[in-house]
Image: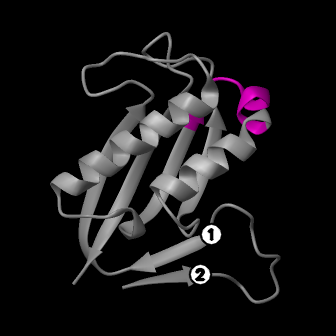
Amino acid sequence: MMKILQPPHWARPRGYSNGVTARGQMVFAAGMIGWDAQCVFHSDDMAAQVRQALTNVVEVLHEAGARPEHIVRMTWYVTDKREYVAAYPEIGKAFREIIGSFNAAMTAIQVAGLVEDRAKVEIEVTAVIPD
């Protein structure tokens, strides 16, 4: 069971939750980047890499019997804040199609670079499968 933590006097955030509480089996997915299962990049576009990284997240969660709605926390590392913000519409569309709701507690951090030179985004996830 997951509960969104939203202080009543705070403005509702767009695209994430301020906090989440959950009970059940925890699943941790390492940082997923925008390459496919064979470690091949098909695009250098930020939104396309986000779409692939989210697909990778869902595939890893599936191995534990978890689904996207079980995600309680996401940390996004992006190499270019401006490119990330400019891609919000496409990223939002991919997120809704692959993950669904925007209920996870999320953090996005701009970094100088990622280990894989072509990677523009890396997303790590914590999910909780309800008891």
What is the magenta range? 77-85
Q: Position of residue 14 (x, y in %)?
A: 74, 64
Q: Is residue 71 left or right of residue 17?
A: left
Q: Is residue 79 magenta?
A: yes
User: Is residue 74 visible in the rendered structure shown here?
Assistant: yes
Q: Is residue 88 magenta?
A: no
- Tell me the SS state at disc 1: loop
Residue 5 lies in quadrant:
bottom right
- Tell me the SS state at disc 2: strand
Which amino acid type is marked by label 1? Ser
The answer to whether marks 2 and 1 mark residues whose Cβ atoms lie closer than 8 Å is yes
Q: Check residue 17 in the rendering and tell me which mark sits there, or answer none.
A: 1
Q: Position of residue 26 (x, y in %)?
A: 26, 65
Q: Is residue 23 above or below residue 49?
A: below
Q: Quadrant of the N terminus?
A: bottom left
Q: Position of residue 104 (x, y in %)?
A: 52, 65
Residue 62 lies in quadrant:
bottom left
Residue beneath the point at 79% across and 29% down: 82
Query: Of 8 and 101, which appears nearest the observer?
Result: 101
Return the disc, 2 or 1, that comes first in the chain's sequence.
Answer: 2
Q: Is residue 66 above or below residue 107?
A: below
Residue beneath the point at 24% across and 20% down: 38
Query: Of 97 and 3, which appears nearest the observer?
Result: 97
Residue beneath the point at 56% across and 35% down: 77
Q: Is residue 73 left or right of residue 65?
A: right
Which amino acid type is marked by label 2? Leu
Q: Quadrant of the C terminus?
A: bottom left
Q: Which residue is mark 2?
A: 5
User: Is residue 78 visible in the rendered structure shown here?
Assistant: no
Q: Is residue 57 left or right of residue 83?
A: left
Q: Position of residue 93 (x, y in %)?
A: 63, 50
Q: Residues within 10 Å of mark 2 (few under 14, many from 20)?
A: few
